[in-house]
Image (cartoon, rainbow, N blue to C red):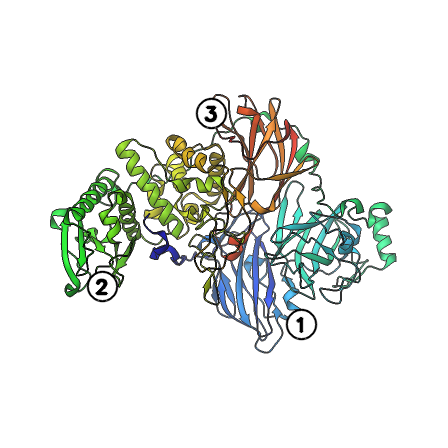
Amino acid sequence: MLNHKAKGYRLATLLGLGLMTATWGNAASAGCSYTVTNSWGSGFTAAIRVTNDSTATINGWQVNWAYSKNTVSSAWNARLSGNYSASNIGWNGTLRPGQFAEFGVQGATNGGAVEVPQVTGAACGTAAVASSSIASSKAASVTSSSVASIANSVNIAGLATATTSYVSPWETIRAVNDNSNPANSNDKTAGAYGNWNNPNSIQWVQYDWPQNYALSSTQIYWFDDNGGVLTPTRAYLEYWNGSAWVNAGNVPLAKNAFNTLALNNVVTNRVRVSMLNTTQSTGILEWRVSGTAAGNVASSVSTSKSSTALSSSLRSSIASSIALSSSSARSSTPASSSSVRSSTPAVSSSSSSSAPSVAQCSAYDWPKYEPDLNYDFRTDFGQVDTSKFKVYNGCPASTIAGVKTKGRFAFIWGKNRNPSITDADIDRVLTNLNEDADYIHNVMGWPVDKLQAEGYFSNIYLYGSGLCTDSAANTERGGWQSGINGYPMVLLSYYPVVTPSERGGITHEFIHTIMATRGNKAAWFNEGGNTWLQMNLEASRTGNYGVGFLDATSFLAPHMPIENYSGWLQDGTFGGPNAEGVDRRVNGQQISTWREYLGGNQYNAAFPHFLGVHVSKGANAWIWAKGPHNHILRSLAGGVGEEQTQRMIMEFRARQAMVDFGPWSNAFKVPINNNWGRTINAERIDGGILQDPGAHRLTFYSATTQEGTTLVPSTTTLPGWSGANQIPLKVTGNKVRVSFQPIGQNMRVQLAYRAADGSAVYSKPVTSGEACLDLTKAPKNGVVVAVVSNVDHLYNGEETRTRKHDYRLQLLEGVTGTAPLYDKHYQ
């Protein structure tokens, strides 16, 4: 790399997504909901969710809705037409049982109230009907569902036991289900639940009932004191299906109102609401749940559609009908535990105490990927005849003082060439470039750039020499891949030209011209994929498996996503695939956003190396040749499917925990060991506004606290999308068993360790419940690592970029506690 900050492709835009023809299987059905997520008088935004509630896969969907006065101006994650119809786009058309697709719309109220229309269509199990929009003065807190009604339901929150991740000592968890009716979001006359001081962290409140209920809806009144406790910026509700938490949808975020989410009559005895505010803490004044005892007819009890308070006689009749003891009818978290983080609710016995089969605990061998994506560019591209190349000036002849050609390249300079550059320097640059390019094309089989493909020399322009490419002084330093008239090319200042040690940097920029010719890929992969190719060039040519100093970043901060530019940002979020969230300004002044060392994460080649070693030798070439999307994981899902892509993420994270990368393993250990335990801080930008999150010490491993037998991860390093946590466990005996409780969506856990003989041993990955591994080989240093990964492979904007994924890990057998965080358990 010569100067990564100046690359024009860094902020590359997303590719347009192809549309899929909507088809519908006869056995499939879905539920559709419409949620107003924000409103501001003249406008609103809303989320429409299509959920596959059947046992068959849905291949393509279309929904319809209408308004009385409201209109839609834009939509995302769906194709919008008419007034109004929306259909899936290519990547979100296939919904397996239990999955959902959600898209957003923004619109105008046109002088009316925000409306909440019914969503209809085959995808909702309903036919298209005329508009039945419901105007509401509190529409920002209302959800409409085509498959669920809150009729015949009553508020059963008072019958639940309430627990929480944390409650401030001066607040009370008992406030959430005392059936109060707040006047506004800062009305604490009946008490309040708040979790100050836990800013920018996911906190939760949970209801447990002694029997199952069919839940039709939930209503939450957020606590907001305009200070340290604010309305969440994100909140979602989950229910327990007997073995795992299942996401039921996002809860609206309106102040001074009950926020309603339809629950489609899901049957459960446990629900949890998780909430996060990215700058402050969160709280609840009242949380109602509307439902009926599962299997009972409730019409004789109540026909009201509201969530109003239960009368005492009605409450007692419900309590007696389900034989509920008085001690549990309205109990909440005991006072002794209300001021500390309470333990996670017990995992059901079916997932924690049943004896696992031998197969579950045996060492796991990762299966091969089908297809294996082993693409060879030579299938489509042959060699070029360099003897017939012509010079493409690009700039007007009047600005060009000299051109020197050799082999595949032309070196072009203007009239202001820095006098320190000799002809011998130019000859050396051209000789080195030709040697590297010939190997890349002739031996490794990668195609040429656009200029060579059209019969021209690849151009190297001298930056600062008076050409049409720039207006810089001839003393400027740096080098970049850029473009001229649609052709990728290289810009070099005088410094790399006169400095022999810059050979690798110059080749790096030339490789960018090859990749730029192949099309638009996310900015992080333009860098990580580039360094991967250059490392393979050297390994193939010399037998030296060496990596760069930045290749340890993704190992030492595995909670960062795979598709990530500039690493773990100072505000606790992550840079997006194309540097989303990185370049931020306030009144024109830039904000310092990245952290020391991790700010160069895009240059790490760990994931491309994983693809090349564990998927196929040609998997990276497949991405450039056949990958249809800007985002790499999305492209991979198009090649091997969603399930295998999620498995690929889990395998990558588990092999990272063991530094299991075939011939590259020892190479990766060099920068890992050189930066192990290093303390990093916020990196300042000259003249920028510094955000200082405090110091962080680099390690593979995530801090946890133990509550009974349950490990609770630090919220600071919770994984982002496709990120992971590694928890080192001290073990004894011949078996390790843990129970995994995911809180975030799309989570996995896998056990892994280095055996005394040096081999890496893995358990079968699980989505929830028990993970088990026989210690047939003795673990080195008596440590087994629990690798918890999020396997979200689709980047869908700001919510994805800022979201953290929580979980709990219960210790069942063979674990005495956690091992030290700064010991190298991968050795």
- Whether residue 826 sits left or right of residue 490 in the image: it is right
Q: Give the labeled residue for mark 3.
A: 759
The answer for how far apart the CA atoms under marks 1 and 3 are is 64 Å
Find residue 384 and report its horizontal and vertical position in percent: 17, 46
For numbered disc 3, what is the local secondary structure? loop
Do callouts 1 and 3 mark residues in contact (Cβ within 8 Å)?
no
Q: Give the labeled residue for mark 2.
A: 468
Label located before the other in sequence (2 or 3): 2
Closer to viewer: mark 1 or mark 3? 3
- Whether residue 431 sits left or right of residue 88 in the image: it is left
- Amino acid of disc 1: Ser
From the viewer's perspective, is residue 376 above or below residue 259?
above
Mark 1: few, some, or many residues within 10 Å (few <14, many ≥20)?
A: few
- Whether residue 797 sits left or right of residue 470 in the image: it is right
Q: Is residue 371 visible?
A: no
- Amino acid of disc 3: Ser
Q: Residue at x 39, y 57 (%)?
A: 11
Which of 89 and 348 lies nearest the eye of the viewer?
Answer: 348
Quarter where residue 304 is shown: bottom right
Mark 3: few, some, or many residues within 10 Å (few <14, many ≥20)?
A: few
Which of 643 and 654 lies nearest the eye of the viewer?
Answer: 654
Find residue 181 and report its horizontal and vertical position in percent: 77, 63
Q: Residue at x 30, y 34 (%)?
A: 539
For numbered disc 1, what is the local secondary structure? loop
- The number of numbered badges drawn on the structure is 3
The answer for how far apart the CA atoms under marks 2 and 1 are is 60 Å
